[in-house]
Image: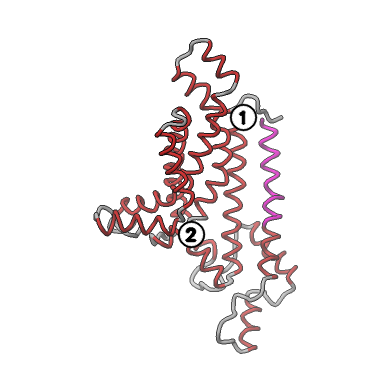
Amino acid sequence: MTKYIIRRLLGMIPTLLIIITISFFIIRIAPGGPFDSERSLPEQVLQNIEAKYHLDEPVIVQYGRYLFDVLRGDLGPSYRYQDHDVNFYIFTSLPNSIILGIIALTIAIVFGISAGMLSAVRQNTWVDYTTMSFAIVGISVPLFVIGPVLQWIFAMNLGWLPTSGWIDGDYGLKTLILPSITLSLGYFANIARLMRSSMLETLRSDYIRTAKAKGLKNSVILFKHTLKGALLPVVSYLGPAFAGIITGSVVVEQIFRVPGLGKFFVQSSFNRDYTLIMGVVIVYSVILIIMNFIVDIIYSFLDPRISYK
């Protein structure tokens, strides 16, 4: 196991390098630039600005310079936000996205696994149909519909919760409830459906039939023998889901005015802010790679048939 962990950790380096390289050149190849606007700048002014940010150098030289800065932990200056560098904007907004993402994913995991198990145990009953119908709604209805509907019901009509804001405002932790629920619904639906199908398959396995034949209690069979095997597809899904729920909460952050990473990702795309786009891509890639690595390690604990040598 130790050799496998070291090998995987070392394997992350070329993977991240390939992602940075491809992203860097795709952004540069795309038409337009960070200083393009409706009103063109004078040629001399544009040349001075490009010289300041080394954009007048050959692309391969820019790539080498950027890669050297990234290795030092410097994601570069923002071309549009002059007050601070990219590190500041990402690492002041990323914690907010992580807080929202962890809460939303926790809600999705707890209720998704519970709903999937209940649906599998009560297969083809009203419980099964109701749970899966709710899951289909969570997958089908987009977040930009769910969010405003929850705001209308719980904030505007009932007055229980604020429409928007963040935990450092007047409403405190109450501001987390609506965006967390909104963001968790899609992931809850996927986890519930995965858990149901995996649970049904595991319940029909030979070793479960053997456990039943030995006269073990249903609760023991369900939680000690069935649950571990049924969790494998869910755990596999949670790796990219964790990365996606943090950096993919753009819509929710805009609806509920959460000062997270999504705001900068959207604005940097419109502004063609090369360094800020690259910074967000690198952060997302690192989270995704690390979570997939953790998932592989958890696999070996859930299923003794899986071993890494």
Residue located beneath label 1 in the image: 300
Mark 1–mark 2 distance (CA, rounded to whole Å): 34 Å
Q: Quadrant of the C terminus?
A: top right
**Residue 92, can we see it?**
no
Give the residue pinned by disc 2: 250
Magenta-highlighted stretch: main secondary structure?
A: helix
Q: Give the quadrant of residue 18.
A: bottom right
- In depth, the one of 58 and 131 nearer the eye is 131
Query: Residue shown at 65%/25% (left/top)?
Result: 305
Instruction: Give the class, few, some or many, for how many residues have Cα within 10 Å of label 2's Cα (few <14, many ≥20).
Output: many
Please name the residue shown 59% across and 48% down the image.
288
Residue that appears at 51% across and 73% down: 82
Q: Amino acid at mark 2?
A: Val
Specify whether 83 is left or right of 176: right
Q: What residue type is disc 1 on?
A: Ser
Q: Position of residue 171 (x, y in %)?
A: 28, 55
Query: What label does residue 69 carry, if any?
Result: none
Q: Is residue 89 above or below residue 47?
A: above
Numbered range of the magenta stretch: 1-19
The secondary structure type at the circle numbered 1 is helix
Residue occupying image coordinates x 59% and y 87%: 41
What is the tally of numbered marks visible in this picture? 2
Q: Position of residue 199 (x, y in %)?
A: 52, 30
Specify whether residue 137 is painted magenta: no
Whether 4 is among the magenta residues is: yes
Q: Kindly indicate the quadrant of the structure image that contains residue 282.
A: bottom right
Vertical relation: 35 (above or below) 293: below
